[in-house]
Amino acid sequence: MATPENQSQSPVRKTRRRHQKSRNGCIECRRRRVKCDEMKPSCTRCVWALDKCIYRSPFPQQSAEKHEKDQLSLPTWSSLCSVVSPSPSASSHSERSPSFEASASSTPAFVEAKNRDSNVADGPQGLSDTDLYHHYLQHTSRTLTLCPGDENALQIGMPTLALQSKTVFHSILAVSAACLGWDMISKKPPPDISVVSQALMTGYRHYSLASEQMRESISCPGDLKPEPLLASTLMLVPFAAASQQINHWISSKSGTPEPRRLLSTTPRDVIIMMRGIRTTLQTLDSGNLSPNIRLSLEPEFTTDSSPMVSDANIGPAAITPPRTHVMVPIVAATSHGAFSKLQTRLESAVLYHSDGPDGPLSACSAAFEILKDIRNNAFSTSNLPPSSSPNNPVEDSFEPETEPVSLSQVAPWLHSFASRSAIPLPTEPLTRYFLSFLIQAPQAYLDLVLPLLDQRLESPVGNTSEIAAKLTSVQALALNIYAHWSVLMFLVEEESWWIGNLPTVTLSGMVNRYGDDFVTTLWPDPGQEQWWPGSMLNILREIKRHR
């Protein structure tokens, strides 16, 4: 006979709410043992999870076998726009997942996205944490990079670490939601704006939750675990870029553009995160972390050691495809002369306006040398990594030296992924190498150029000569260097969906604000040649217009 003490210790069983049982749900929902709303042609859960939605036929066994053979495919947009209220099982499942409740993010893009449509709910209807995690495993993790060396980290290491760390968990869900939103806007015909906004808002929410967890970790250095901090930052870099891309798409579809509306995109978040990755690795390398650091994952992962991702879903081919962007041969053929001309203008400015080794002009010169080395190495025909320029103040291009980090502090797979070799081989992706410019560039250069980039406009303002005339020669050089880097970033549009057309948007916003002759105004060109970044932008626009 149970005593009161035993009764108080026994768990209280909740009364299950009465509901109508789904007996005709799709195969995927039945497999996952969740309620299916039986929407046709695709149920809500399969729409949001980007699963192939198949309903039982008179021969259920044959349908199930066919479903197992079907590869992941995107649903039709008619089904995306037919999202309904969340099912009871979705609500209960969200309660078991880490909480969505958090204070709203204060980032401008987040505030703009939320204010744009006040009718958007707190999260996409019917989309739970498990849906986003499943979408990351089946789709996002296989599309974040084309580099075979990164597959283990993204497809096995990160998802496993996410199950042990709320910080990594929310970071993965944030980039998964951004991937879902990008998949929507890249399809034709365009989807309903409210559906894309819901996915974006969900991503911002998880971004906010991950950031909050990271701040809490940093505030307790005595109990700091470096792996979740490093892994989360690596995952939030793609989210920061992709969310700006989606936010710009929504803004462009939201009616007549306002005159002199500032561009909502900014490289600030990406710069902060990427520099944070470098600082973390440098701190680990120096051994300055607290001795109380605890590991979440010790062994290095291999594809054969975990059944989390099946062999059929590994994603990109084992051999990375060559760089196939249509602008690659054009940029390779014309960039040498353009960089030489920019160097001549820099040398002229230094000759007449020397400001010392710590001045803004010296910072521009250092930034240009870094960018020139990146350009030369990227288009080198040799398989051997070219030597760095003696003027380059940073010896390694992406992260600190790879020798290095004690395996007692960071798991080998994570350190390898974070400090991937900088200079790519001719058949390897260029994204991380080109982004290394934001890490290597002197802080004085960034302090000079970022306020100027904050003034970029979404649409042209007509005559820009008066605005351009107010630029100093140092400001014009800083913008010119950044414009040259943006042209290089054109080439990663197809290899990294989370970068996409952001470089085009960035350079267009610069031209909308300052025009395409602010350089020749200060340095007249005897040959009357068009400004190289502006000419590359026009060529890319024409190519896309005729595709």
Image: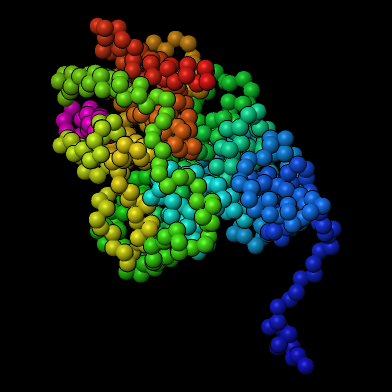
Q: Where is 235 relative to 445, above or below?
A: below
Q: Residue at x 73, y 48 (%)?
A: 54
Query: Residue 314: x percent and y percent?
Result: 50, 51
Q: Nearer the viewer, residue 315 or 183?
A: 315
Q: Residue at x 73, y 44 (%)?
A: 42
Image-based side of 95 in relation to 37, left or right: left
- Tell which residue pokes out farthest to the bottom in this image: 1
Image-based side of 464 in relation to 333, left or right: right
Structure colour scheme: rainbow
Q: Residue at x 65, y 28 (%)?
A: 189
Image-based side of 199 in relation to 425, left or right: right
Q: Is residue 260 visible?
A: no
Query: Residue 329: x percent and y percent?
Result: 35, 24
Is the N terminus in the top left, top right, bottom left or bottom right quadrant?
A: bottom right
Q: Where is 331 relative to 416, above or below?
A: above
Residues drawn in magenta: 355-374
Q: Nearer the viewer, residue 6 or 472?
A: 6
Query: Residue 43: x percent and y percent?
Result: 74, 46
Q: Nearer the viewer, residue 285 or 64?
A: 64
Q: Is residue 378 visible?
A: yes
Q: Where is 482 relative to 431, above or below?
A: above
Please say whether residue 378 is one of the residues in the magenta stretch: no
Q: How many marks?
A: 0
Q: Where is 155 relative to 436, above or below?
A: below
Q: Residue at x 54, y 51 (%)?
A: 313
Please say whether residue 364 is one of the residues in the magenta stretch: yes
Query: Residue 153: x percent and y percent?
Result: 43, 54
Magenta segment's dominant SS is helix
